[in-house]
Image (cartoon, rainbow, N blue to C red):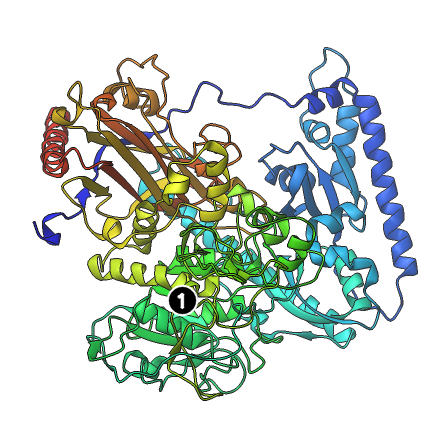
Amino acid sequence: MSETDFPHLPLVKRTSGSYQAPEKQFPPTPDREKENRANSGSHCNALSRSIEQIKAIWANDEEVRSETAPALPAGKPILIQLDPENRDLDELRRSLGFEVICQEEDGFVIVASHDIHFTELQEAIEKLSRLKPGDRLERGGGVAARIYDASVSGGDQRLKQILSPTLYERWGEIADNETLWINAGISCNGGYEPRLTEMRKSETEEKYQARHRSERMKAYDRWDEVRTERIGQIERFVEAYDGYIDPSTKEPDTDVPDEFTARIRLPGVGLRDFVFNYPYLFDVEEAEVADLPVSPSSTSTGSTSPVVISPPPSDAIPICVVDSGIQENHRLLKAAVDSSESRCFFGNSPADVADYVTPSGHGTRIAGVVLFGDNIPSTGTHQAEFWIQNARVLNKQNELPDDRAIYDMLSEIVDHFRYGHRGTRIYNQSICSPSVCRLRHMSAWASKIDALSDRHDVLFIQSVGNIHPDATGRMRLGIKQHLAAGRDYPSYLLMDSCRVANPGQSLQALTVGSISRDVYRSSTWNSFADAPQRPSAFSRTGRGIFGVVKPDVVEFGGDFVRNPSNDISNNPIAKSVYPDLVRCNLHTAGPSTDRDQVGTSFAAPKVTRLAAQLQAIFPTKSTLLYRALIALSARWPDWAFFGSRPEQIDAVRHLGYGVPDHDRATQNTDFRVTMITPELQKIKTKQVDVYQINIPDRLRKPGNAGEVLIEVCLSYSAASRRTRRDRRGYLAVWLDWRTNYAGESADEFVARLVKEASGSVSTDRERFNWVVGEHAGAGKLTASNRTAGTLQKDWCKMPADQLPASFCIAVVGHQGHSVSPLDEAKYHLTVAVESLGQEIELYNDMVAEVDLLANKIEASKVEIDELET
């Protein structure tokens, strides 16, 4: 058969409906809240003392604060502690008049109080204080029992919550006159949320939704007013300290309407005043710098060949390279560069798009990998496969510019290329911060990627970041420092200082790490990896924020070599472990290509190529499908796939879901079938979609012991909110998937999960042997769980004769930060069934089962419609 004889098959949706949650609908009252009610007198006295202390500190601050210090808003920041599982943060606004600024760890919530006398909180405390044993609590007093503690904002606890780890570590060392660039996250919800009410009896669904859309627009208008007001406050404050604020901060941002990030330059004295006293601040980090790849080589020994590259077809897929610029007249790249769209996104020279990274470029190399992968042609004439678009974001010092934030540039980049003449949807970003990602709030850079991906249906392929041979810093050690401390390869890769770099923690970005390909051995020098497809010595590892699996996938980006003294080579002695790259020769003469650098930068564009190839096959589909198929095709190398449990626990942090495969992503065989949701699906909170896959009898016949692999991958997106600190609060709607039990029929599965369904519920509880598991500890990988991210893959193996007659998957929508009936998540679901030993031909049988099931479900729907009519 030809490749086209094995297209992906459609997943058959069995039914949709309201999600029937397990019996435990409402969480029990927390023990501490019960204690507060039982000991209401002592709890109320403690809360009252805290309030008096806060008021006294505020009064003292007003006296001590310099008369020349700039004016501040009337609101004051407070740290409130609630039960960590309390999701109803809006109660603080409704009942107490607080403006919720952000949710933090361990139940802490930063709020702003515009009432310095705490009138409403005092009333709630008084109501709770009057509670006697056996009495019913007065309406409004319960919120006082749910508040465990309250403290002034300037304390160490709040600093830990809002400062980045690096900034917190050096907070006490910052001199008054030391100048710092920061990114300051500012809430601008103004204490205003859309009014959400139940559907009225006389109201149609259409009118109900229209009413909520109107309420949402009112909220957006109000948030925009508050944003404008708070930008003015910050401008005046910064000006008073002779600082600077990035002008792009003033531009409206429809992607994140209820918060914004201001890029600010302040002296140390002004920074302390701002952090301690500005009430709407929820996140402060030092401004990003770019971390470029590692360069173990210092000389060039590559080649220049007579190959000719011709332009791609006019309708070829475009790929935007967000990087240091590109040498656009390079003989290997020129024909494929869409130079009419090239742009520099900072400064005053938008046409200055050259690659200034010395000695031999960075963006130029990325463009070469995007075009050619591992196989740069050396002779003849070759047609380029894609259009390359050049988005320059690094300055002539090869750094992110101080006065222009990368997250603001990304908005302009997507606007320029996504809505340009080629409609670009795939973006390669092989630059990142040298700092590790934070585990509290999503960074402004990563959050922007999430918002742009959801709103504009674009896919960012992001490098995971590099560990340099020799580096210093509290949060970032080099390889030599790890080796000197007795942490050898690969154990040092799992240290916190080697965690995925910002913005690789983005939930929507497809984050790519690096693995080795070849092993180098000599009498003096040896590669770190002792076998192919091991983690590269420099590749950062997961888990990411919220415990998400990161990197998502890995590709070949090279390896380091070392001698017995743990010196890391600076000479090109081990060419086989370096990737072949296109060199920029704007600055130094040399060959067109060379094997002279390594880095995760060069692993990411190989995955970008696959994403573009998938877009060429599915041009009208969402990028969520491309992401799902890449992850579905990924597989661990044999050492991990067939490894021990400890090896697999480490492997998911090193490799994510593994190495993607072009053939598995794009086609099928007699022995493998891939099924996909044919269209982009949308689902709201408390809804469930159930899909059914019937397994052919011939595959399940007794004695058919060939091993079958089942892989499932869900890729989804939803609106995000950076002021929330976990996945359930960060996303408006979050999704997970679950399957039927081993002995549970399709009818029983539907009856268990769908409220509107009737029928018996199975008592079988034997689960499939999933590797990752739907929650920590459910699979083989202990601390990992597949539901934490928006890319959720899992897999299990079993003998063919143990397969169920029907394999069912339910995608369930859960409430995140939004309670609006308008909010929904978008998703693609993909499933693959494969005979691992290629003993069982299954493709044609699966085609027949899909057709048979689809016709049966369609006939059933027609019958129901006729009965209802």
743 or 864, nearer to the observer: 743
446 sits to left or right of 388: right
Rendered position, 11 above or below 133:
below
Residue 562, compared with residue 57, is above or below; it is: below
From the top left corner, tell me how far across and down residue 28 is, in percent: 59, 20
Residue at position x 68%, y 27% in the image: 142
Secondary structure beneath disc 1?
Answer: loop
Residue 724, position as x, y percentages in the image: 58, 46
Residue 697 horizontal side relative to residue 819, left or right:
left
Q: Which residue is mark 1?
A: 579
Q: Amino acid at mark 1?
A: Pro
* Above or below, 606 relative to 350: above
Tell which residue pokes out farthest to the left in this image: 1
Q: How busy is the neighbourhood of tag 1: few (under 14 within 10 Å), some, or many (20 plus)?
A: many
Residue drawn at (51%, 59%) of the image? 526
Residue ID at (61%, 76%): 403
Is 624 situated left or right of 43 in this image?
A: left
Quadrant housing the C terminus: top left
Residue 744, x across and y down, in percent: 28, 18
